[in-house]
Image: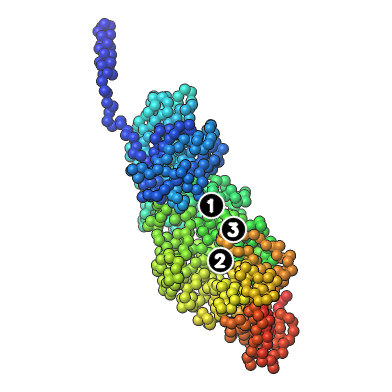
């Protein structure tokens, strides 16, 4: 028996040796083919610091922003080091964005892809790379307007390997070269088989794990496995190579779709944003996102991992995703995002506060803010504040100034204060009181892109931008204004949003909008910026009303100035900025009127006396109809007033200062000589003013006196008025200094200049008269303001006011009409002027009067 057994073993060994000499083919089902070329392909298996590697880019993949490109393309590349704080913290950038050098120009291949060969050590001029973890890169067109990125908008990264240490890479599936690799396939189905092919740089032990559980292992420099994807949500695949006592791991993330639960939104839960029910210890999250396949709630409560427990339900109409959590601690603040269709991470569009990893470093630190979840996610995250102290309002009732008495001070926090915050702004209320204004209009404070901005690039309409301070600090400023009788008006930007907006990103591919339920794919009008809201969309109307209601109720503001209100139209006048296109855009638009009547009614239902002001500039017929609804319109008189103050008479007609020139019965418009948007009058006076002999409007003293004259004509006319910050001091820095929207120098030192302070005191006197005398609100007007000598007369209840001035640079004779041959009180000089027998007077260049039958009331 023993002999027969040994012979049997020998026979088997012989058969095995014979078989080894043949081509033995493995089971067909175990073969994993290499993946088709992905967004980026490498000529070598590994990116080594001291070897040349060719990177080849497929423009039809990734975000596709350069798809079908045939022009020159350029690499933009930098390093991620062990000292980098995040994947966005590029170091030693080797390329210039604004220079198109041959050294980083890509080559177009015959198949339409683009390639570039780089030797990292030479490219980055760095011999050693012990602290280099990744090379980060983008591909741009010649002017940088289009950029190739990953499909989710992230930067492309490739890990740097070392010859001294084993490494492993995924040859299949195709991946996006992200900081943490993701499959280029958007989503897998539950139960789907994922072919995995791993390649190692050295022979060793290779292991493959799924969500921390080992699923395959092997020896050598290659491992193939067909992985069953039975979980739902983000699945984390890890490859590990161990050789010669060293090891390296690389991760791959894929998304697996499961069955979506369809359920009605429970009663009491908002259709968007967060609903907090402290009685039930529940917090519900809801997001409008029609035509999406899946949505997961991710946050620091689940380490930003999309798992089955955080899959959101979808309402039967397919529009809303929602989930209710019970386990959150009401004594904490949380950060969260939504993961849409397995690829796109967005912050909550209704978030009251967001964290921006790219720009928050410039913001003053707030101990109440949670820290950014570095390493757990990327992009902007929402903050859920559960333990913040509510602001205790000191002024619970505030009697707003009559709308027709308003003197509004338009103010940009960034360029008004050295400290640029609401705390310091609150300390400046005393200055506004001295000037006498009864309303402040803040340029946009909603979360806008970057930090140093005018604010007309909003991305989160419910969030206060942190650059100027906290929610409670803004509330304290508003509260303090109310205590001093000053109303607060917010500049509201709802014509458009910018690219960081989650509502834009939800339906954005290749840099373009597709089937977005809120925005037009192509803007409908000239001068649009960002992405153009479609205000005929019911979803846009609901969003707009939600934004309006939030700022009215949460911050107790007194009014809104709506930016670019003429853009609330679906009547397409194109994006051409020619005069013809602008005229077409400005023409009577019944749909636009209906939209604004709808929004105005919504506001009036909540607060009948709320100020609604539009930057409209449409034809008078349309503005007249809107005024009939109690809406005020911006009335830009910059050009006419500037021509007059410079002493040029041909285009200085001031008739649009008065209601009859608009066809209005009452002045339902806010007139101004300057706003944030126009060149400063004093700058143009000093640069381009008219002269005659020794009289020159370019000379500072004369220019300041002519600003007094212009202010008198503006502020004494009936109706609400607006002053742009520092106009009362003769601010003379061009709007274009440091770029139109760039930071401008502060000029508080003007207060120490006696001539400039005299202009401030003059403004204060005019504002005081306007507020203390009803004639400046209700007076009937006759005007003659189209020549060098301009005048208008107000009459009301036995009082009569004459404002007259010579805007020429030479003396002018004025034939006094019989109706003006009266005994007048000169309110500026404090004397009586008897014109009862005067048929003619001579006005010197720049001379003016504010005369009245009875001395004007004043508090000063």
Give the structural element (helix, strand or loop) at label 3: loop
Q: Residue 355: x and y, percent?
A: 54, 50
Q: Quadrant of the N terminus?
A: top left
Between 34 and 472, the residue placed more toward the observer is: 34
Cα separation between marks 2 and 3: 15 Å
Q: Residue 779: x and y, percent?
A: 60, 83
Give the structural element (helix, strand or loop) at label 2: loop
Q: Can residue 6 be seen in this view?
A: yes
The answer to whether mark 2 and mark 1 are in CB contact below 8 A is no
- Bin the neighbour count of mark 3 within 10 Å (Cα to Cα): few under 14, some 14-19, many 20 and up: few
Between 690 and 81, the residue placed more toward the observer is: 690
Cα separation between marks 1 and 3: 29 Å
> What residue is shown at x 66% (from left), y 56% (from top)?
419
| Discs 2/1, front | 2
| Residue behind mark 3 | 738
In this rendering, is residue 394 above or below 228?
below
| Residue behind mark 1 | 354
Give the structural element (helix, strand or loop) at label 1: strand
């Amino acid at each position: 028996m023993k002999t027969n057994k040994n012979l049997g073993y020998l026979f088997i060994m012989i058969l095995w040796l014979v078989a080894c000499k043949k081509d033995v083919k493995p089971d067909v089902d175990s073969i994993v083919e290499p993946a088709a070329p992905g967004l980026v392909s490498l000529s070598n298996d590994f990116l080594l610091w001291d070897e040349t590697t060719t990177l080849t880019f497929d423009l039809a993949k990734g975000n596709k922003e350069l798809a079908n490109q045939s022009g020159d393309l350029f690499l933009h590349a930098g390093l991620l080091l062990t000292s980098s704080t995040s994947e966005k913290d590029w170091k030693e950038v080797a390329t210039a964005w604004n220079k198109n050098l041959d050294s980083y120009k890509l080559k177009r291949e015959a198949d339409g892809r683009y390639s570039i060969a780089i030797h990292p050590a030479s490219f980055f001029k760095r011999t050693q790379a012990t602290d280099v973890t990744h090379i980060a890169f983008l591909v741009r067109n010649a002017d940088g307007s289009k950029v190739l990125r990953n499909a989710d908008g992230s930067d492309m990264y490739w890990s740097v390997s070392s010859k001294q240490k084993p490494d492993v890479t995924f040859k299949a599936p195709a991946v996006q070269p992200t900081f943490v690799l993701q499959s280029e396939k958007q989503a897998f189905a539950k139960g789907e088989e994922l072919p995995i092919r791993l390649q190692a740089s050295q022979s060793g032990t290779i292991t493959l794990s799924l969500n921390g559980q080992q699923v395959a292992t092997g020896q050598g420099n290659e491992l193939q496995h067909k992985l069953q994807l039975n979980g739902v949500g983000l699945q984390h695949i890890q490859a590990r190579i161990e050789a010669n006592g060293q090891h390296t791991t690389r991760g791959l993330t894929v998304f697996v779709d499961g069955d979506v639960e369809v359920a009605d939104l429970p009663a009491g839960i908002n259709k968007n944003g967060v609903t907090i029910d402290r009685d039930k210890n529940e917090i519900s999250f809801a997001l409008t996102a029609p035509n999406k396949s899946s949505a997961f709630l991710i946050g620091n409560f689940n380490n930003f991992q999309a798992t089955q427990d955080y899959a959101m339900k979808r309402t039967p109409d397919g529009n809303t995703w929602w989930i209710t959590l019970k386990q959150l601690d009401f004594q904490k603040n949380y950060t969260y995002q939504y993961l849409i269709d397995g690829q796109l991470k967005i912050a909550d569009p209704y978030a009251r506060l967001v964290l921006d990893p790219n720009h928050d470093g410039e913001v003053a630190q707030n101990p109440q803010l949670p820290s950014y979840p570095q390493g757990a996610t990327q992009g902007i995250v929402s903050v859920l504040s559960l333990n913040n102290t509510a602001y205790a309002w000191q002024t619970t009732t505030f009697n707003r100034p009559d709308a027709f008495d308003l003197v509004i001070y338009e103010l940009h926090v960034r360029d008004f204060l050295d400290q640029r915050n609401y705390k310091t702004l609150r300390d400046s209320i005393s200055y506004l009181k001295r000037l006498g204004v009864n309303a402040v209009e803040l340029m946009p404070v909603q979360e806008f892109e970057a930090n140093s901005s005018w604010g007309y690039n909003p991305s989160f309409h419910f969030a206060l931008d942190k650059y100027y301070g906290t929610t409670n600090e803004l509330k304290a400023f508003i509260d303090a204004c109310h205590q001093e009788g000053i109303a607060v008006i917010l500049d509201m930007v709802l014509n458009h949003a910018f690219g960081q907006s989650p509502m834009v990103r939800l339906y954005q591919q290749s840099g373009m909008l597709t089937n977005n339920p809120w925005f037009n794919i192509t803007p409908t009008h000239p001068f649009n910026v960002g992405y153009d809201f479609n205000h005929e969309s019911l979803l846009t109307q609901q969003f707009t009303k939600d934004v309006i209601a939030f700022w009215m109720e949460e911050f107790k503001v007194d009014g809104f100035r709506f930016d670019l209100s003429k853009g609330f139209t679906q009547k397409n006048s194109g994006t051409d900025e020619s005069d013809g296109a602008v005229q077409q855009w400005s023409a009577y638009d019944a749909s636009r009127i209906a939209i604004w009547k709808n929004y105005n009614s919504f506001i009036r239902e909540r607060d009948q006396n709320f100020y609604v002001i539009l930057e409209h500039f449409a034809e008078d017929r349309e503005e007249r109809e809107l005024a009939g609804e109690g809406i005020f319109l911006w009335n830009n008189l910059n050009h006419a007033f500037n021509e007059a103050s410079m002493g040029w008479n041909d285009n200085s007609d001031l008739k649009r200062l008065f209601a009859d020139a608009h066809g209005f019965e009452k002045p339902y418009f806010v007139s101004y000589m300057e706003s944030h948007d126009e060149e400063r009058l004093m700058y143009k006076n000093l640069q381009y003013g008219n002269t005659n002999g020794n009289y020159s409007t370019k000379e500072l003293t004369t220019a300041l006196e002519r600003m007094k004259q212009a202010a008198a004509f503006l502020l004494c006319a009936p109706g609400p008025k607006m002053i742009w910050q520092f106009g009362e001091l003769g601010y003379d820095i061009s709007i274009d200094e440091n770029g139109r929207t760039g930071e401008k120098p502060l000029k508080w030192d003007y207060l120490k200049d006696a001539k400039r302070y005299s202009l401030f005191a003059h403004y204060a006197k005019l504002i005081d008269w306007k507020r203390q005398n009803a004639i400046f609100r209700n007076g009937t007007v006759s005007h003659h303001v189209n020549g060098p000598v301009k005048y208008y007369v107000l009459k009301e209840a036995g009082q009569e006011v004459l404002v007259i001035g010579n805007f020429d640079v030479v003396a002018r004779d004025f034939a006094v009409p019989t109706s003006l041959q009266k005994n007048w009180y000169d309110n500026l000089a404090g004397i009586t002027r008897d014109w009862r027998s005067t048929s003619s007077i001579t006005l010197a260049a720049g001379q003016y009067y504010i005369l009245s039958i009875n001395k004007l009331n004043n508090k000063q």
